[in-house]
Amino acid sequence: MPSTLLETCEYREEIRKSRFITLAAPIDTPADAQAFLERHSDLAATHNCWAWKIGAQYRSSDDGEPGGTAGRPILAAIEAQDCDQVVVLVIRWYGGIQLGTGGLARAYGGGPTSACNRRRNAC
């Protein structure tokens, strides 16, 4: 049975000099997701990639990363954790070392997995 987060969760990591901050939050509507993304995106960051899922509705964005390397892995992490009614934003500051498409997919999928796992601990 799908579950959602109790409150906003945050996970931070550095991968090959790039900084990643993952924010995950419960939502009820697509408008809630959009408001969260507008409120928390950092325009000074290199990328603000995201995904959200509410029942059968979902959306994602790679925000300039190579196609399929950010938004889809975030959405896949949401689904793998059996989360619903959740939005996940991963903010990246590029550190000068390219991660490649596989590295990007792992980085963007890893943060949401850690953040969504925290729902079991009430964040």
Image: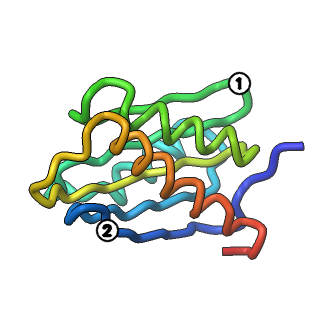
User: Can you tell which of label 1 and label 2 is closer to the viewer?
Assistant: 2
Q: Residue furthest right?
A: 1
In the image, residue 94 sits, relative to residue 56, either above or below, namely below
Residue 117 locus on image (x, y percent): 68, 62
Q: Which mark is residue 56?
A: 1
**Quadrant in which residue 116 is drawn:** bottom right
Residue depicted at 49% across the width and 70% down the height = 10
Q: Residues within 10 Å of mark 2 (few under 14, many from 20)?
A: few
Q: Amino acid at mark 1?
A: Ala
Residue depicted at 50% across the width and 54% down the height = 110
Report the quarter where the C terminus lies: bottom right
In the image, residue 76 sits, relative to residue 38, either above or below, namely above
Residue depicted at 9% across the width and 56% down the height = 96
Residue 121 locus on image (x, y percent): 75, 75
**Quadrant in which residue 4 is drawn:** bottom right
Residue under label 2, please give it. Answer: 14
In the image, residue 62 sits, relative to residue 42, either above or below, namely above
Q: Secondary structure at mark 2?
A: strand
Q: Which mark is residue 22?
A: none
Q: How is the image coloured?
A: rainbow
Calculate the distance from the C-alpha at mark 1 to the C-alpha at mark 2.
Answer: 33 Å
Instruction: Please state if 35 lies on the left or on the right of 14 as rendered.
Output: right
Instruction: Please state if 45 lies on the left or on the right of 15 as rendered.
Output: left
Q: Residues within 10 Å of mark 1 (few under 14, many from 20)?
A: few
